[in-house]
Image (tube, rainbow, N blue to C red):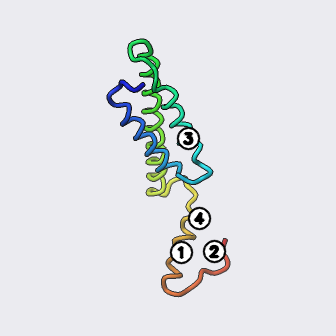
Amino acid sequence: MGSFKGLRMVYRNLLKAVEKHIGKEEHKVHFTDFIREEFKKNRNLEYPKDSSFIQQRIKLAENYTYLLNSVHHHKDLLFSYNIAVDRSNEMTKVLGKSAASVGLRLPDVYQS
């Protein structure tokens, strides 16, 4: 896989999307570990011989990156339009922070 010009950028973009949208926490590292292993496993392929396989793998990585970014952009749009998304936990946090900033506490009804 090493002979393609944009391979490094595809790899980097995929890792950035996974770290941004899935997270870097200890219990989520298997996502980035899998991606690293797949790219390492396929880096010794020969260009002319394995060209179609290499192109399929690059396209798969690009599509997965695009999917991750699009799903999270869509979720952000839903939040901004307040459509079909349960925002009760988010609103409770905002209300709690607002109340705490002026030295008050939310009533027990709003406490989790």
Secondary structure of the residue carrying numbered label 4: helix
Give percent across and percent down for residue 1.
Answer: 42, 25
Image coordinates of residue 21 in percent, x first then y, are 49, 49
Q: Are marks 3 and 4 in contact (CB under 8 Å)?
A: no
User: CA gap, disc 4 to disc 2?
Assistant: 10 Å
Image-quadrant location for residue 45: top left
| In the rendered image, the vertical position of residue 39 relative to residue 52, given as above or below | below
Name the disc covering residue 33, or none: 3
Q: Amino acid at mark 4?
A: Asn
- Three-letter code, disc 3: Asp
x, y percentage for residue 8?
A: 37, 35
Residue tagged by mark 2?
110
- Chain-order first, disc 4 or disc 1: 4
The reply to whether discs 3 and 1 touch (Cβ–Cβ < 8 Å) is: no
Q: Earlier in the sequence, mark 3 or mark 2?
A: 3
Against 74, residue 40 (above or below) is: above
Pointer 3 or 1: first along the chain: 3
Mark 3 nearby-residue class (10 Å; few <14, some 14–19, many ≥20): few
What mark, if any, has residue 89 been given in the picture?
A: 4
Q: Nearer the viewer, mark 3 or mark 2?
A: 3
Q: Considering only order in the chain, which callout, 2 or 4, is on the residue closer to the N terminus?
A: 4
- Which residue matches tag 1? 95
